[in-house]
Image (cartoon, rainbow, N blue to C red):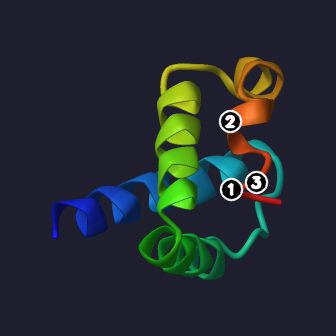
């Protein structure tokens, strides 16, 4: 249960951040749903989402783009 909640928080945060930084029309709901599904079925994806969220959380959009590419490339398009 904790992992499910953690994945939901990570996925929502990652998808909302992508929308706010890169594409205001990005479908956050679909992204978060796809991310949560992948996190619940693929343990490696859950780790990637955790790393991505941790990397972007305290950075500006520009800094996150350059610093977190490796961590986030497979989580959001």
| Residue denoted by label 3 | 74
**Which residue is at a point 57% across and 79% down the rendered structure image?**
29
Residue 24 x, y percent position in the rendering: 76, 60
Residue 33 appears left or right of 9: right
Residue 14 versus residue 71 in the image, above or below: below
Image disc number at residue 71? 2
Report helix, strand or loop for mark 2: helix
Q: Residue at x 48, y 73 (%)?
A: 36
Contact check, label 2 and label 3, Cβ < 8 Å: no
Q: Residue at x 73, y 58 (%)?
A: 76
> Mark 2–mark 1 contact, CB under 8 Å?
yes
Location of the N terminus by quadrant is bottom left
Q: Which residue is mark 1?
A: 75
Separation of residues labelled 2 and 3 (CA atoms): 8 Å
The tag on residue 41 is none
Asked if the residue under mark 3 is in contact with the one under mark 1, i.e. CB atoms within 8 Å, the reply is yes
Which corner quadrant of the image does residue 7 belong to? bottom left
Q: Secondary structure at mark 3?
A: loop
């Amino acid at each position: 249960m904790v992992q499910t909640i953690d994945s939901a928080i990570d996925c929502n945060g990652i998808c909302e951040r992508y929308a706010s930084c890169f594409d205001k029309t990005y479908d956050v709901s679909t992204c978060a749903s796809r991310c949560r599904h992948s996190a619940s079925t693929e343990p490696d994806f859950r780790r990637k989402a955790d790393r991505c969220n941790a990397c972007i959380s305290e950075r500006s959009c520009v800094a996150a783009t350059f610093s977190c590419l490796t961590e986030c490339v497979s989580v959001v398009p």
